[in-house]
Image: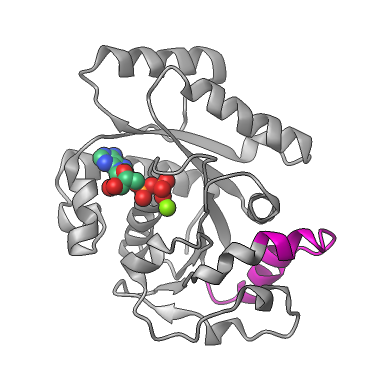
Protein backbone atom coordinates (compact mmCIF):
# COMPACT_ATOMS: atom_id res chain seq x y z
CA UNK A 1 0.00 0.00 0.00
CA UNK A 2 1.31 3.42 -0.97
CA UNK A 3 0.21 6.66 0.62
CA UNK A 4 0.09 10.04 -1.03
CA UNK A 5 -0.83 13.20 0.85
CA UNK A 6 -1.88 16.29 -1.08
CA UNK A 7 -1.02 19.38 0.90
CA UNK A 8 -0.14 23.04 0.80
CA UNK A 9 -0.18 25.57 3.61
CA UNK A 10 -2.43 27.61 1.32
CA UNK A 11 -6.09 27.09 0.56
CA UNK A 12 -7.58 27.21 -2.90
CA UNK A 13 -4.49 25.98 -4.76
CA UNK A 14 -5.93 22.73 -6.14
CA UNK A 15 -5.39 20.08 -3.47
CA UNK A 16 -8.89 18.65 -3.61
CA UNK A 17 -9.21 18.87 -7.40
CA UNK A 18 -6.00 16.86 -7.74
CA UNK A 19 -7.12 14.34 -5.13
CA UNK A 20 -10.33 13.67 -7.07
CA UNK A 21 -8.53 13.42 -10.40
CA UNK A 22 -5.96 11.02 -8.99
CA UNK A 23 -8.72 8.94 -7.41
CA UNK A 24 -10.27 8.61 -10.85
CA UNK A 25 -6.96 7.61 -12.44
CA UNK A 26 -6.51 5.02 -9.69
CA UNK A 27 -9.90 3.55 -10.56
CA UNK A 28 -8.98 3.39 -14.25
CA UNK A 29 -5.84 1.47 -13.37
CA UNK A 30 -7.76 -0.84 -11.07
CA UNK A 31 -6.12 0.14 -7.79
CA UNK A 32 -8.17 -0.31 -4.64
CA UNK A 33 -8.00 3.20 -3.28
CA UNK A 34 -8.97 5.02 -0.11
CA UNK A 35 -9.41 8.79 -0.08
CA UNK A 36 -9.09 10.24 3.40
CA UNK A 37 -10.76 13.63 3.67
CA UNK A 38 -8.82 15.35 6.45
CA UNK A 39 -10.22 18.79 5.70
CA UNK A 40 -13.16 19.84 7.91
CA UNK A 41 -14.48 21.75 4.90
CA UNK A 42 -15.19 18.36 3.38
CA UNK A 43 -14.64 19.20 -0.30
CA UNK A 44 -13.44 15.71 -1.23
CA UNK A 45 -16.46 14.36 0.64
CA UNK A 46 -18.66 16.66 -1.43
CA UNK A 47 -17.25 15.10 -4.62
CA UNK A 48 -17.12 11.47 -3.60
CA UNK A 49 -19.20 10.96 -0.47
CA UNK A 50 -22.59 9.36 -0.64
CA UNK A 51 -23.60 9.91 2.97
CA UNK A 52 -23.91 6.21 3.79
CA UNK A 53 -21.14 5.79 6.35
CA UNK A 54 -21.46 6.47 10.05
CA UNK A 55 -19.79 9.82 10.65
CA UNK A 56 -16.51 9.55 12.49
CA UNK A 57 -16.10 11.92 15.43
CA UNK A 58 -12.77 13.70 15.83
CA UNK A 59 -12.10 12.06 19.20
CA UNK A 60 -12.56 8.60 17.66
CA UNK A 61 -9.37 9.20 15.71
CA UNK A 62 -7.57 8.73 19.00
CA UNK A 63 -9.19 5.42 19.79
CA UNK A 64 -7.16 2.23 19.51
CA UNK A 65 -10.16 -0.03 19.09
CA UNK A 66 -11.85 1.43 16.13
CA UNK A 67 -13.36 -0.48 13.24
CA UNK A 68 -12.49 1.96 10.48
CA UNK A 69 -14.59 0.11 7.96
CA UNK A 70 -17.74 1.36 9.65
CA UNK A 71 -16.73 4.86 8.66
CA UNK A 72 -15.51 4.17 5.16
CA UNK A 73 -17.93 4.29 2.24
CA UNK A 74 -18.03 3.45 -1.45
CA UNK A 75 -17.84 6.25 -4.02
CA UNK A 76 -19.20 6.48 -7.57
CA UNK A 77 -15.76 5.27 -8.69
CA UNK A 78 -15.49 1.50 -8.46
CA UNK A 79 -12.77 0.36 -6.11
CA UNK A 80 -12.41 3.88 -4.69
CA UNK A 81 -13.56 4.44 -1.11
CA UNK A 82 -13.65 7.48 1.13
CA UNK A 83 -13.27 8.20 4.80
CA UNK A 84 -15.50 11.27 4.76
CA UNK A 85 -14.88 14.47 6.71
CA UNK A 86 -17.21 16.22 9.04
CA UNK A 87 -17.09 19.65 10.62
CA UNK A 88 -15.97 18.20 13.96
CA UNK A 89 -12.59 17.44 12.35
CA UNK A 90 -11.62 20.98 13.31
CA UNK A 91 -10.96 19.63 16.79
CA UNK A 92 -8.58 16.98 15.46
CA UNK A 93 -5.47 19.10 15.73
CA UNK A 94 -6.13 20.03 19.34
CA UNK A 95 -6.78 16.38 20.18
CA UNK A 96 -3.75 15.07 18.35
CA UNK A 97 -1.43 17.69 19.79
CA UNK A 98 -2.46 16.71 23.29
CA UNK A 99 -0.78 13.36 22.66
CA UNK A 100 2.05 13.87 20.20
CA UNK A 101 3.70 10.59 21.08
CA UNK A 102 0.93 8.71 19.30
CA UNK A 103 0.90 8.29 15.53
CA UNK A 104 -2.81 8.15 14.82
CA UNK A 105 -2.75 8.41 11.05
CA UNK A 106 -0.01 5.81 10.73
CA UNK A 107 -2.03 3.48 12.94
CA UNK A 108 -5.12 3.92 10.79
CA UNK A 109 -3.15 3.15 7.64
CA UNK A 110 -1.52 0.11 9.18
CA UNK A 111 -4.87 -1.43 9.94
CA UNK A 112 -6.03 -0.89 6.35
CA UNK A 113 -2.87 -2.10 4.68
CA UNK A 114 -4.30 -5.34 3.34
CA UNK A 115 -7.39 -3.62 1.90
CA UNK A 116 -5.95 -0.88 -0.28
CA UNK A 117 -3.24 -0.40 -2.89
CA UNK A 118 -3.29 3.37 -2.62
CA UNK A 119 -4.33 5.95 -0.03
CA UNK A 120 -4.85 9.58 -1.00
CA UNK A 121 -5.01 12.06 1.88
CA UNK A 122 -6.69 15.36 1.03
CA UNK A 123 -5.18 17.66 3.66
CA UNK A 124 -6.50 20.93 5.04
CA UNK A 125 -4.31 24.02 4.53
CA UNK A 126 -1.98 25.18 7.30
CA UNK A 127 0.83 23.48 9.17
CA UNK A 128 0.04 21.73 12.44
CA UNK A 129 0.17 18.35 14.19
CA UNK A 130 -2.40 16.76 11.88
CA UNK A 131 -0.33 17.79 8.87
CA UNK A 132 2.86 16.53 10.48
CA UNK A 133 1.20 13.15 11.04
CA UNK A 134 -0.06 13.03 7.46
CA UNK A 135 3.46 13.78 6.21
CA UNK A 136 4.92 11.02 8.39
CA UNK A 137 2.36 8.51 7.15
CA UNK A 138 2.83 9.45 3.49
CA UNK A 139 5.31 8.08 0.98
CA UNK A 140 4.89 11.25 -1.06
CA UNK A 141 3.43 14.68 -0.37
CA UNK A 142 2.12 16.36 -3.50
CA UNK A 143 2.31 20.13 -3.22
CA UNK A 144 0.35 22.22 -5.70
CA UNK A 145 2.03 25.54 -6.41
CA UNK A 146 0.64 28.51 -8.28
CA UNK A 147 3.00 29.83 -10.94
CA UNK A 148 3.72 33.17 -9.32
CA UNK A 149 7.03 34.67 -8.19
CA UNK A 150 6.13 33.88 -4.56
CA UNK A 151 5.74 30.13 -5.07
CA UNK A 152 9.38 29.54 -4.30
CA UNK A 153 8.91 31.18 -0.91
CA UNK A 154 5.88 29.11 -0.12
CA UNK A 155 7.68 25.91 -1.09
CA UNK A 156 10.64 26.92 1.10
CA UNK A 157 8.28 27.22 4.05
CA UNK A 158 7.34 23.57 3.61
CA UNK A 159 10.97 22.55 3.22
CA UNK A 160 11.77 24.29 6.50
CA UNK A 161 8.83 22.57 8.16
CA UNK A 162 9.95 19.07 7.10
CA UNK A 163 13.53 19.85 8.14
CA UNK A 164 12.33 21.05 11.55
CA UNK A 165 10.42 17.85 12.25
CA UNK A 166 13.04 15.57 10.63
CA UNK A 167 10.88 14.31 7.77
CA UNK A 168 12.91 13.58 4.61
CA UNK A 169 12.40 16.45 2.18
CA UNK A 170 12.56 13.92 -0.67
CA UNK A 171 8.95 13.12 0.20
CA UNK A 172 7.91 16.51 -1.14
CA UNK A 173 6.71 16.37 -4.72
CA UNK A 174 5.76 19.85 -5.91
CA UNK A 175 3.80 20.49 -9.08
CA UNK A 176 2.44 23.59 -10.72
CA UNK A 177 -1.27 24.09 -11.02
CA UNK A 178 -3.38 26.66 -12.89
CA UNK A 179 -0.63 27.28 -15.41
CA UNK A 180 -1.27 29.37 -18.47
CA UNK A 181 1.67 28.43 -20.69
CA UNK A 182 1.11 31.54 -22.78
CA UNK A 183 1.66 33.92 -19.88
CA UNK A 184 5.20 35.21 -19.61
CA UNK A 185 4.85 35.58 -15.82
CA UNK A 186 3.93 31.92 -15.47
CA UNK A 187 6.79 30.73 -17.67
CA UNK A 188 9.22 32.93 -15.74
CA UNK A 189 7.97 31.60 -12.39
CA UNK A 190 8.39 27.99 -13.54
CA UNK A 191 11.88 28.75 -14.73
CA UNK A 192 12.86 30.54 -11.54
CA UNK A 193 11.55 27.64 -9.49
CA UNK A 194 13.46 25.07 -11.55
CA UNK A 195 16.68 27.05 -11.14
CA UNK A 196 16.34 27.31 -7.38
CA UNK A 197 14.47 24.23 -6.22
CA UNK A 198 14.89 21.83 -9.12
CA UNK A 199 12.56 20.84 -11.90
CA UNK A 200 9.20 19.75 -10.42
CA UNK A 201 9.27 16.10 -11.30
CA UNK A 202 5.49 15.85 -11.45
CA UNK A 203 5.16 18.59 -14.03
CA UNK A 204 2.29 21.03 -14.29
CA UNK A 205 -1.43 21.26 -14.86
CA UNK A 206 -2.91 23.99 -16.99
CA UNK A 207 -5.58 26.45 -15.88
CA UNK A 208 -9.01 25.73 -17.28
CA UNK A 209 -12.56 26.37 -16.19
CA UNK A 210 -13.18 22.66 -16.75
CA UNK A 211 -11.57 22.08 -13.36
CA UNK A 212 -13.93 24.60 -11.78
CA UNK A 213 -16.80 22.84 -13.50
CA UNK A 214 -15.87 19.59 -11.76
CA UNK A 215 -18.02 20.83 -8.87
CA UNK A 216 -21.09 20.98 -11.12
CA UNK A 217 -21.06 17.45 -12.51
CA UNK A 218 -19.22 16.04 -9.46
CA UNK A 219 -16.75 14.21 -11.65
CA UNK A 220 -13.02 14.19 -12.16
CA UNK A 221 -12.02 16.17 -15.25
CA UNK A 222 -10.19 13.06 -16.48
CA UNK A 223 -13.58 11.35 -16.33
CA UNK A 224 -15.75 14.02 -17.95
CA UNK A 225 -13.15 15.25 -20.49
CA UNK A 226 -10.62 12.45 -20.96
CA UNK A 227 -9.25 13.80 -24.25
CA UNK A 228 -8.81 17.41 -23.10
CA UNK A 229 -5.30 18.78 -22.71
CA UNK A 230 -5.76 19.22 -18.97
CA UNK A 231 -6.51 15.49 -18.67
CA UNK A 232 -3.32 14.77 -20.56
CA UNK A 233 -1.42 16.93 -18.03
CA UNK A 234 -2.95 14.88 -15.23
CA UNK A 235 -2.35 11.55 -16.99
CA UNK A 236 1.31 12.42 -17.36
CA UNK A 237 1.53 13.32 -13.68
CA UNK A 238 -0.21 10.09 -12.68
CA UNK A 239 2.25 8.03 -14.72
CA UNK A 240 5.24 9.71 -13.08
CA UNK A 241 3.68 9.16 -9.68
CA UNK A 242 3.01 5.47 -10.37
CA UNK A 243 6.56 4.93 -11.52
CA UNK A 244 7.99 6.95 -8.65
CA UNK A 245 5.99 4.98 -6.07
CA UNK A 246 6.46 1.69 -7.86
CA UNK A 247 2.70 1.30 -7.78
CA UNK A 248 1.65 -1.91 -9.48
CA UNK A 249 -0.57 -4.92 -8.99
N1 LIG B 1 -5.99 23.88 -12.95
C1 LIG B 1 -7.03 24.62 -12.54
N2 LIG B 1 -7.62 25.49 -13.40
C2 LIG B 1 -8.67 26.24 -13.03
N3 LIG B 1 -9.21 26.23 -11.79
C3 LIG B 1 -8.66 25.41 -10.88
C4 LIG B 1 -7.55 24.57 -11.21
N4 LIG B 1 -7.23 23.86 -10.09
C5 LIG B 1 -8.11 24.23 -9.13
N5 LIG B 1 -8.97 25.17 -9.61
C6 LIG B 1 -10.07 25.82 -8.88
O1 LIG B 1 -9.57 26.49 -7.75
C7 LIG B 1 -10.47 26.38 -6.67
C8 LIG B 1 -9.75 25.73 -5.49
O2 LIG B 1 -9.42 24.38 -5.84
P1 LIG B 1 -9.39 23.22 -4.77
O3 LIG B 1 -8.96 22.01 -5.48
O4 LIG B 1 -10.67 23.18 -4.01
O5 LIG B 1 -8.22 23.77 -3.83
P2 LIG B 1 -7.82 23.41 -2.33
O6 LIG B 1 -8.28 22.02 -2.06
O7 LIG B 1 -6.33 23.57 -2.32
O8 LIG B 1 -8.50 24.42 -1.45
C9 LIG B 1 -11.64 25.55 -7.15
O9 LIG B 1 -12.67 26.41 -7.56
C10 LIG B 1 -11.07 24.81 -8.34
O10 LIG B 1 -12.04 24.48 -9.29
MG1 LIG C 1 -9.48 21.29 -0.50
Q: Position of residue 90 (x, y in %)?
A: 58, 63
Q: Position of residue 59 (x, y in %)?
A: 68, 75
Q: Position of residue 16 (x, y in %)?
A: 39, 53
Residue extent of the magenta highlight: 93-116
Q: Tell me the quarter of the picture where residue 102 sits.
A: bottom right
Kindly give the residue lying farthest to the right in the view shown. Answer: 101
Q: In this view, does 36 lie to the left or right of 98?
A: left
Q: Residue at x 39, y 30 (%)?
A: 146
Please tell me whether residue 5 is drawn above or below residue 154 in the rendered image.
Answer: below
Q: Can residue 234 be seen in this view?
A: no
Q: Position of residue 13 (x, y in %)?
A: 40, 40
Q: In this view, does 101 lie to the left or right of 135?
A: right
Q: Which of 96 and 182 is in front in this view?
A: 96
Q: Residue at x 50, y 69 (%)?
A: 87
Q: Does the magenta stretch include residue 96?
A: yes
Q: Which of 233 and 127 is in front in this view?
A: 127
Q: In this view, does 74 lie to the left or right of 98?
A: left
Q: Tell me the quarter of the picture where residue 166 sits.
A: top right
Which color mode does the image show? one colour
Q: Tell me the quarter of the picture where residue 176 sits.
A: top left
Q: Is residue 52 magenta?
A: no
Please tell me whether residue 29 is drawn above or below residue 70 in the rendered image.
Answer: above
In what quadrant of the picture does the N terminus appear? bottom right
Q: Is residue 133 visible?
A: yes
Q: Is residue 162 left or right of residue 9?
A: right
Please tell me whether residue 151 is drawn above or below residue 210 in the rendered image.
Answer: above
Q: Residue at x 46, y 45 (%)?
A: 241
Please state the quadrant of the image where ligand 1 appears: top left
Q: Nearer the viewer, residue 156 or 172?
A: 156
Q: Residue at x 31, y 14 (%)?
A: 185
Amino acid sequence: MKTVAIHSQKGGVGKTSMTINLAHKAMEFGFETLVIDLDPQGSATFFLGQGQATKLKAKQWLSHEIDWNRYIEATPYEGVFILPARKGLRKLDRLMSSDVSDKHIKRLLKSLKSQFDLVLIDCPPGINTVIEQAYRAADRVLVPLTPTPLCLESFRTLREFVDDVAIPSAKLAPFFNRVNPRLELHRASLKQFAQNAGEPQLGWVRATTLIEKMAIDKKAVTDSHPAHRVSRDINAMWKVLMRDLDLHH
